Image (cartoon, rainbow, N blue to C red):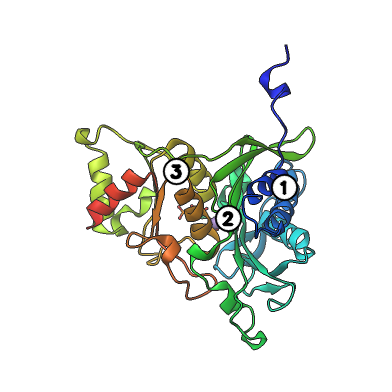
Amino acid sequence: MPNESMTKPIVTIVQHIREKQRAFPTATGDLSWILSGIALATRIIQSYVRRAGIADVLGEVGTTNVQGELVQKLDIVANETILRCLGYRDIVGIMVSEEDDEPTIVKSPTGQGKYIVLFDPLDGSSNIDVNVSIGTIFSVLRCRDDLPESEGATPHCLQPGVKQVAAGYVVYGSSTVLAYTTGNGVHMFTLDPSFGAFVLHTENIRMPDQGKMYSVNEAYLDSFPSGVQDYLAWAKTPESGGYGLRYIGSLVSDFHRTLLKGGVFMYPPTAKNPDGKLRLLYEANPLSFIAEQAGGAATDFKQRVLERQPDSLHARTPLLMGSKSEVERVMGFMN
Ligand code: AHG
Ligand code: MN
Ligand code: MN
């Protein structure tokens, strides 16, 4: 008797998004075309990640990027792979990368290029050389239709997270997992390396509403806001019922665990990063969209991340996200 995996339908990302989009008469299949470009790029990136030590993609390039961070070889490989896989797709007008100072205009935003793809090509770069899970994060916006050509690309990109039409991430972990949302639930796929396709395994993921787990780099405890310090002190007392701490140091992996197991992830303001370290457009916004679509919450310790108006391409934001009741609990300590 064949087991269930031999009888369950094989649904790839393009099929899935097309099925989901059928419910929207105005859907044009554009998003499935963009998602298939991202799926292609991340299949190529994971092939380098799995061979990093022998594909000569470990270590630093010797330069620093616009973030002031040392660029890893794999950052560049991932960045160039995404640009090459998406740049050719006629509906992509602008691409924004953590690794590039300025947006890349691939098609005129007032012409064919209707969409903007914003991405962190390789998240968790400090973990590459020690073989710890890393990932790719992406966000999709529509170009604005109220801007003259003369305005250039950046004003099209500075839209709040509520304007996203799609978002997702890929975790290059013990397996390669892709999660995406177009505002119609969060759906998760695993790459089947035997034939190189992402195959659907869970639709409409729900983030557990509770979670006795917090994820934060407590090395910066002294410079956290006092409300965060009070929450972390409370979590260590018997009255809290006992919490666990998990911190991988790759946002995408810490988020993926929080999405599946519940709890809370925090990158608060610190002395070194008074506006937080994580970038709004291609880290916080896409993961906040996913968190909310899964029934969780995401704030900047004051307001919904998705309502934050970006003032620059690489703007940073404090980030508090996870199970709704846990985020509310931290916010309670903040107030
Ligand atoms: P990136 O590698 O894209 O620069 O992102 C690294 C980020 C994020 O992945 C992670 O949550 C955070 O840096 C870890 O920062 P600390 O080492 O300061 O904890
Ligand atoms: Mn990152
Ligand atoms: Mn990165």
Give the residue pinned by disc 1: 14
Is residue 320 at all visible to an observer of this figure? no
Describe residue 146's horizontal placement relative to residue 44 as left or right. Answer: left
Q: Residue furthest top?
A: 1
- Which of the marked residues, 3 or 1, is nearer the chain's N terminus? 1
Residue at horizontal 75 percent and vertical 35 percent from the top? 193
Task: Locate the C terminus and report the quarter of the image it occupies.
Answer: bottom left
- Which of the marked residues, 2 or 3, is nearer the chain's N terminus? 2
Give the residue pinned by disc 2: 167
* Real-space Cα separation, disc 2 to disc 3, in angstroms: 23 Å
Q: How many other residues sit within 10 Å of disc 3, few (<14), some (14-19) or many (≥20)?
A: some
Describe residue 75's horizontal placement relative to residue 90 as left or right. Answer: left
Secondary structure of residue under mark 1: helix
Q: Nearer the viewer, residue 60 or 308?
A: 308
Q: Is residue 230 above or below residue 105?
A: above
Q: Is mark 3 within 8 Å of ligand 1?
A: yes
Using the image, tell me which numbered label, if any, was put on residue 247: 3
Describe residue 174's horizontal placement relative to residue 249 as left or right. Answer: right
Secondary structure of residue under mark 2: strand
Tag 1: amino acid: Val
Tag 2: amino acid: Ala
* Real-space Cα separation, disc 2 to disc 1, in angstroms: 15 Å
Q: Nearer the viewer, residue 163 or 73?
A: 163
* Real-space Cα separation, disc 3 to disc 1, in angstroms: 33 Å
- Label 2 or label 3, whichever lies nearer to me, is 2
Where residue 40 sits in the image (x, y, percent)?
A: 75, 50
- Label 3 or label 1, whichever lies nearer to me, is 1
